[in-house]
Image: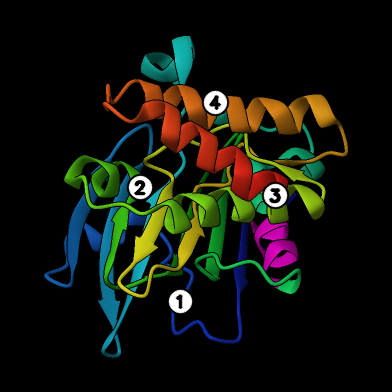
Amino acid sequence: MKNSIFINSEQSPFSEEECNIDFWKKSSNASLIGEGRSQVYLIEKEEKKYVIKDYYRGGKLRSLLKKNYLYTGLARVRPLLEWSLMLKLLEGGMQIARPIAVHVRRFGIFYQASLITEYVPNTQTFESYLSRGIYTKEIIQAIGKEIKRLHELSVTHPDINTKNILIDTSYRVFLIDFDKSKESQHTFRFNQDVLRLIRSIQKLNLDDFEAIKFNIYKGYEG
């Protein structure tokens, strides 16, 4: 692997330097919109909005390694795997935020990386949608159907939860955050995806949890 890999889509207006959160932290055209395991910024260029994230370690290694991942071969570089999977999902007809650019920077035995995707406007997370208490069974079932489509494309999403699902004002469903996703044909892993989402919903302590759970499965099973 070279010291740097930069991949640009046809829709990208970004340079290699701009595919890095450190560049945007100094810009008036950027605002922090997420502070989970990965920092996420909303950025604007040429009158269009995009989302950029840096990859951060999770678990016990987070405080020690932060943004540094051990390089064990090009085929195992997580942002490149996520990029490839997102392209596969788009080709399969799924509604996801289109990947725009990815930048991998190697430092000795470690690498750091950034990913830019298109910004999907007028959305809220599934968690926010549920918390407002105005949801319908049709929307809940649409989420189940979208997860089923993901699995029909032989992709699993080990980090699916109420914060990684977006719903726009036209009630379209978007799955996000595929950095842990993998190609798989194992029914067990597919079932675990659905169960993980159900547990995420249960943590919200909603009165009609059982009805929501029923409609997730109804949408999934078709």
Question: Are the residues tagged 4 and 1 within 8 Å (C-beta)?
Answer: no
The local crowd at label 2, few if under 14, some if 14 to 19, many if 20 or more residues have their Cα within 10 Å, is many
For marks 3 and 2, give the CA distance.
17 Å
Q: Is residue 21 visible?
A: yes
Q: Residue at x 64, y 66 (%)?
A: 94
State which quadrant residue 83 falls in: bottom right
The local crowd at label 1, few if under 14, some if 14 to 19, many if 20 or more residues have their Cα within 10 Å, is few
**Label 1 vs label 2, nearer the camera:** 2
Q: Which residue is mark 3?
A: 148
Q: Which residue is mark 2?
A: 126
Residue sitting farthest toward the right: 185
Nearer-N-terminus badge (1/3) = 1
The local crowd at label 3, few if under 14, some if 14 to 19, many if 20 or more residues have their Cα within 10 Å, is many
Q: Residue at x 37, y 70 (%)?
A: 119
Name the foreground residue: 142 vs 56.
142
User: What amino acid is labelled 1 in the image?
Assistant: Ser
Q: Secondary structure at mark 4?
A: helix
Residue 180's disc is none
Q: Left or right: 135 with respect to 17?
A: left
Vertical relation: 172 (above or below) 211: below
For marks 3 and 4, give the CA distance.
14 Å
What's drawn in magenta, residue-wise?
83-90
User: What amino acid is labelled 3 in the image?
Assistant: Lys
